[in-house]
Amino acid sequence: MNEECLICGSPLQYLETDEMMECAICGRKELSKTKCIHGHYVCNECHMAGLDSIIGLCLKEESADPVSILEDMMNLDFCHMHGPEHHVMCAAALLSAYHNAGGQINLEEKLKEVLRRGRSVPGGACGFWGACGAAISSGIFISVLTGSTPLAEEPFALSNEMTSRSLAKIAETGGPRCCKRNSYLSILAACEFVKEHFGIEMKTHETVCFRSHQNNQCIGKRCPFSLANHPSFVKNEKDS
Ligand SMILES: [Zn+2]
Ligand SMILES: [Zn+2]
């Protein structure tokens, strides 16, 4: 249910400074700020094991709605309530939806690139770097889409603007972190951005979260996706 530690399910603690940790799954030793209250540490690589399966999923998707593609990924076993896997998933969902909405891209090549880039954004970047990984993922999406590099002009501007727009939405809502909420916010910000700058209209729908019971730090009504903020949605579900 409200599981946080992948080993024992106990709540995670976030330290202010790095400690040498040993991954309870692969044994890798590295500096990190996250462990469970019983001392278990799981490295980013192990946390994201199975993530490669999203490439196959994305290539089969026919939807132009990135949130529904994201939901399909979130329903897979590799995806946890919170974790750095979301840093790849947002960009991958956006690329697939962009492609299905008529965007002319080599989807498979671009998916592989977002997988490589997104994996290197660690868990906890939201609180420790001041830049949520889901927001960075939306910037990675625009960067990969436009072929941005540190020397680019317009693509550089667009990628950084994308990340900043997602971050603004995330900041507005406040913490504690929720990888689901921040993923939804970033993807919806990207849909608007792409419509404005690329003339491609991805699909969106009324987004409501059904995973709050799995989140020990759910902010309830403060979350724009809380069922409590979507009374008509609850009613429609009952009627149908
Ligand atoms: Zn544990
Ligand atoms: Zn490991």
Image (cartoon, rainbow, N blue to C red):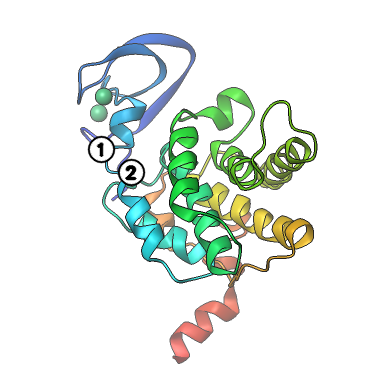
For the point 73% across and 26% down, which residue is it?
A: 151
On the rendered image, what quadrant is the C terminus found in? Answer: bottom left
Residue at 62 percent of width and 50 percent of height: 186
The CA distance from mark 1 to mark 2 is 21 Å
Residue at the extreme bottom: 239
Horizontally, residue 196 falls left or right of residue 228, namely right
Q: Residues within 10 Å of mark 2 (few under 14, many from 20)?
A: many
Which tag, 1 or 2, sits closer to the chain's start?
Answer: 1
Q: Is residue 78 shown left or right of residue 120?
A: left
Give SS at disc 1.
Answer: loop
Tag 1 residue: 9
Q: Is the residue 146 above or below the residue 224 in the image?
A: above
Residue that appears at 53% across and 48% down: 91
Instruction: Using the image, determine if residue 231 lies above or below residue 199.
Output: below
Image quadrant of ligand 2 equals top left
Please state the horizontal and vertical placement of residue 159, each as a whole percent of the image: 70, 40
Q: As rendered, which of 118 and 86 lies closer to the eye?
A: 118
Along the line of sight, which residue is nearer the eye, 68 or 115?
115
Residue type at the position of mark 1: Gly
Vertical comparison of 118 with 62: above or below: above
Q: Is residue 47 left or right of residue 70?
A: left
Residue 198 location, x and y as percent?
Answer: 73, 59
Q: Write down the residue under mark 2.
A: 51
Residue that appears at 40% across and 25% down? 13
The answer to whether residue 226 is seen in the rendering is: no
For the residue labelled by badge 2, is the local secondary structure a helix, a strand or a loop? loop
Q: Is residue 62 above or below residue 35?
A: below
Closer to us: 169 or 214? 169
Instruction: Say if disc 1 is inside 8 Å of ligand 1.
Output: yes
- The amino acid type, in three-letter code, at marker 2 is Leu
Please state the horizontal and vertical placement of residue 90, each as a whole percent of the image: 51, 49
Mark 2 vs ligand 2: CB below 8 Å: no
